[in-house]
Amino acid sequence: MITRRDVEEADARIAGRVRRTPVIEGEPGLVLKLESLQHAGSFKVRGAFNRILGAGPTPDAGVIAASGGNHGVAVAYAARVLGVRAEIFVPEVCAPIKVAGLRALGAHVTQTGAIFADAYEASAKRAAETGALEIHAYDQPEVVAGQGTLGLELIGQARTLGGVDTILVAVGGGGLIAGVAAAVAGEARVVAVEPERIPTLHDAMAHGGPVAVEVSGVGADALGASRAGRIAYETARAAGVRALLVTDEAITEARRELWRDYRLATEHAGATALAALRSGAYTPDPGERVAVVVCGANTDPSTLT
């Protein structure tokens, strides 16, 4: 379980390393948290920095991670800033723009396996051989606490706009939603939004714990964990988080809207939370103020239209 204190400690540790990303108003009652403008294009740098900085001296072998793409880019970015070696394993489904980004940041990249779980198995074996510091994409306390700093930031920013009652967060393995739920406990509700074709947290809630799910669809390169993390499940269950599902079509349309109406270039994962509002999967009560986390921007801009 992650607590608000864990998140506050992470916030102090990574201060000056991450951007305080803006919050903007949409229509009345809606605010967008633009984490897509974060270093390395997603919220993931928060957890990467917290894990590396909180672990003490980095081994000579550096750091190692498996990722659908965004986590790897974040780890590579943090490693470059901190002057340590990064080795990243990604599945074959990883978007080419993310693979290119990893290499541009100086990471050693291995592309292997069909899905994230395959890449993770390979990275864990490599870590055991080299002694590199492992940075899990979502199921590691320091990573989850780092991601939760987004929630602290959002709550503070939203107060200047009239506050927020509910925060919609996209879910892959669940590191972000667990961190945000811990950070805003008692101040706002948190709702999980997942693609219908990758229902990790939804199925974990239904079965009383994380279970394996099939991974496919437009969100697979960023939300492609085959099961929810244990930390995410326990934290979300304790916080009373609801898990909603949205179609690939709704995600794609929400992504188009973010580009058309706000000129925000996002990947499909970055539009997933908004899709819950636009599709009717989540219907706010009268007067309810909702925040949508736009969590990632690592996409090929030519696909936006």
Image (spheres, grey):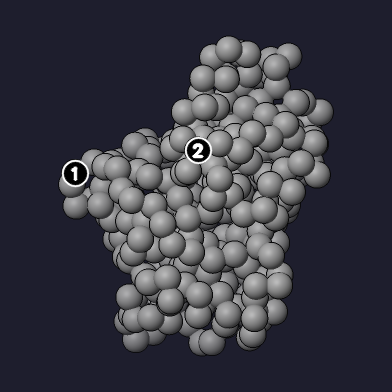
Q: Which mark is residue 113?
A: 2
- What SS does tag 2 mark? loop
Q: Which residue sits at x=69%, y=65%?
A: 300
Q: Which residue sits at x=26%, y=47%?
A: 204
Q: Inspect this view and state whether residue 54 appears.
A: no
Residue 155 position (above or below residue 103): below
Horizontal and vertical percent position of residue 203:
25, 52
> Which dot, 1 or 2, sits closer to the camera?
2
Q: Which residue sits at x=48%, y=43%?
A: 114
Amino acid type, label 1: Gly
Please state if 242 lies on the left or on the right of 158 as rendered: left
Q: Inspect this view and state whether residue 213 appears.
A: yes
Residue 240 position (above or below residue 272): above
Q: Residues within 10 Å of mark 1 (few under 14, many from 20)?
A: few
Q: Residues within 10 Å of mark 2 (few under 14, many from 20)?
A: some
Residue 219 position (above or below residue 73): below
Horizontal and vertical percent position of residue 267:
59, 64
Contact flag, marks 1 and 2 (Cβ < 8 Å)? no
Residue placed most toward the observer, 193 or 283 = 193
Which residue position is annotated with label 1?
A: 208
| Image quarter hosting the N terminus | top left
Q: Which residue sits at x=71%, y=70%?
A: 301
Amino acid type, label 2: Gly
